Amino acid sequence: MVEITQSPNLSVEIAGIRMKNPVMTASGTFGFGKELCDLVDLNSLGALVTKGTSLEPWLGNPYPRTVETPAGMLNAIGLQNDGVHSFVDEKLPWLSQFDVPVIANVVGKTVEEYVEVSRILDRAGGIAGLEINISCPNVKEGCIAFGSSAQGTAEVIEAVRKVTELPVIAKLSPNVTSIVEIARAAVAAGADAVSLINTLLGLAVDPWTREFKLANITGGLSGPAIKPIALRMVWEVSRVVSVPVIGMGGIMTASDAVEFLLVGASAVAVGTATFVNPCAINEITDGLRSYLDNFGVSDVREIVGAAGSRTAP
């Protein structure tokens, strides 16, 4: 008689958003889905987090806007997008053909802009949740200007909370004094989940030309170089908030994803890895399933926060 083994359960629920698995796209690295749909089965994603969407179209920063660094990359895209009306009229209908939760990333220069974009998306239909980006370091107004303080964080999240019934996810910045204080403020203001970390502020210079490598001079550092910082912050936040934590920052392999789950993340988002290998997110999901199989773990939720137990699952 052949023994039939059951595949481990990868499904999770984040702030009421039901996902097939805990592996999501990170905003700004997967476009709006159409850009990579020929390489990645969108139906296999835990959730598709879109590129940032603003009230009016944003042109972004001048070129060059990306540069490779040791164990990572700097980007200063500047949240270029066609605006919320283009998203609702053109991109959202196309996304509706897929069986994947769509989480819209919301950006703005003022509290009023965050509110209006969220209001429009709330009424659009086909959106599972809103990720409120108060942490991008590559724009001169808004975003990190709010997310760098508990007061600013609370102001945006509270205002958005009033105009939507969708799950609200606060995307937090590592460029702060206390990530715990910011996370607590976001949750107290009404966030249903928090995602962290966004990029660290950095720069690169060419010693031969003596010119800055980015036209914007500074940019957001992502990739493996920031993973230890991201892990520490996810661990700190997951211990003090009562809402799910979505971890990101340098996840390149399934092993990286497992580390984030072990320190308290309920789901993970994959970003820079997609630039290296467009199929990375699927490989990470498959690798996570193999990890659980190897340890005889029947449900991915069993390993969330398990770091420090000193015993393998």
Image: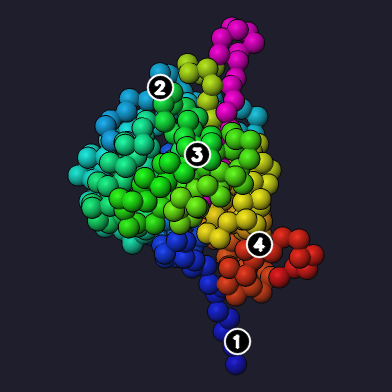
Would you say the residues marked 1 and 2 are in contact, meaning their CB atoms lie under 8 Å apart?
no
Residue 121: give x, y in percent of width and height: 28, 48
Q: Is residue 306 above or below residue 125?
A: below
- Which amino acid lies under the numbered mark 1 shown in the image of this protein? Glu
Instruction: Check disc 4 and report its element: helix, strand or loop.
Output: loop
The dot on residue 151 is 3
How many numbered discs, if any? 4
Q: Residue furthest bottom?
A: 1
Tell which residue pokes out farthest to the right in this image: 310
Q: Secondary structure at mark 3?
A: helix
Residue under label 2: 61
Residue at 71% x, 70% y is 313
Cα separation, mark 3 vs mark 1, equals 57 Å
- Nearer the observer: mark 4 or 1; the answer is 4
**Closer to the eye: label 4 or 3:** 3
Look at label 4 and name its amino acid: Gly
Kind of residue at badge 3: Gln
Indicate which disc residue 3 carries.
Answer: 1
Is 207 magenta? The answer is: yes
Q: Choose between 205 and 176: the one closer to the eye.
A: 176
Q: Nearer the viewer, residue 313 or 67?
A: 313
User: In x, y percent, where is residue 3?
Assistant: 60, 87
**Part of the protein shown in magenta:** 194-212
Q: Residue at x 61, y 51 (%)?
A: 237
Please tell me which residue is depicted at 49% across the width and 66% down the height of the picture: 12
Mark 2: few/some/many CA within 10 Å (<14, 14-19, 20+): some
Residue that label 4 marks: 305
Coordinates of residue 279 in the picture (x, y in percent)? 48, 49
Q: Label 4 vs label 2: CA separation?
A: 39 Å
